Image (cartoon, helix red, strand yellow):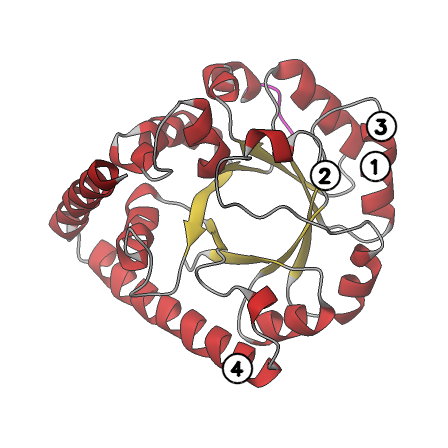
Amino acid sequence: MALKLMYITNNPQIAEIAQKNDVDRIFIDLEYLGKKERQKNINSVKSDHSIDDIVEIKKILKQSELLVRVNPINHNSKKEIDAVIDKGAQLVMLPMWANTDDVEKFIGYVNKRAKTILLLETKEAAETLDEVLKIGNIDEIYIGLNDLHLSYKRRFMFELLADETVHNLIEKIKPYNIAYGFGGLARIGMGMLPAEYILAEHYMLGSQSVILSRSFCNANNIKDLTVLNEIFSEGVGKIRELEKSFERKIENNDNQFFIANHEKVKSCVNKIISNI
């Protein structure tokens, strides 16, 4: 089964291009509480999206789903979640949860009106995952490597892929039949850790979704919509082509390919860390 590809944008023209080129989910990011302080030393996206963007993006979506990341649980969470669902969010993502109380509040506030996604991105969340999984009404869990690697005091986000942290978290999730995904994906042939290595890891681990990263397409730096369309068309096309080859390997029980790929991931990650 092909991964659900997600792209973060509040620009209707870019969302339409992404949708036309087989991106499954358009991702509006409303999270701002605490994010600047947490990620002050890394080159990460600091969103300027607003709740009004939901309506504009929703208008143009025909095939792609609309995902909205809200703020961590706070005194205004119920009002915020009510508003994003009322405006058309089909999936709501909770970041920076740390305990069962956060998750129970989130599940209650959504109240089955949209699909729920937990963004697992802290050591505390990882440590309480066993209890959280028992709560129920969780549709998906996404492992956010940017903040999670900072929480574990690691130097490179994909260290968590190489050292089995992601694998161990997924092994806990699997028995509950909850969909899961992790990390970000650049264009095939790009990235400090090559995107094709990461994509193969998704298939080895049974992942169902991935965010297309700024390395895939930094739309803020490209004003020509024709160029943007070419990037999405070629980039998504190469991902889908490679996915088919991985599906064939799985059908043929070619586990050795994925084992060898994981060794390449570990070797590449170690080289990257040594140069940081």
> What residue did someone put label 1 on?
80
Q: Is residue 130 above or below residue 246?
A: above
- Marks 4 and 1, how far apart at CA: 36 Å
Give coordinates of residue 213: x percent, y percent.
Answer: 48, 55
Quadrant position of the C terminus in the picture: top left
Question: For the magenta stretch, what is the residue range?
Answer: 134-138
Give coordinates of residue 229: x percent, y percent.
Answer: 54, 79
| Crowding near the residue tagged with mark 2, few <14, some 14–19, many ≥20 C-alpha atoms within 10 Å | many
Marks 3 and 4: in contact by CB < 8 Å?
Answer: no
Marks 3 and 2: in contact by CB < 8 Å?
Answer: no
Give coordinates of residue 259: x percent, y percent.
Answer: 15, 44
In the image, residue 136 lies in the stretch drawn in magenta: yes
Marks 1 and 3: in contact by CB < 8 Å?
Answer: yes
- Marks 4 and 3, how far apart at CA: 40 Å
The disc label shown at residue 76, or none: 3
| Crowding near the residue tagged with mark 3, few <14, some 14–19, many ≥20 C-alpha atoms within 10 Å | few
Element marked by disc 4: helix
- Marks 3 and 1, how far apart at CA: 6 Å
* Residue displayed at 41% across by 32% down: 174
> What residue did someone put label 2 on?
70
Q: Amino acid at mark 3?
A: Asn
Looking at the image, the residue that sits furthest to the bottom is 226
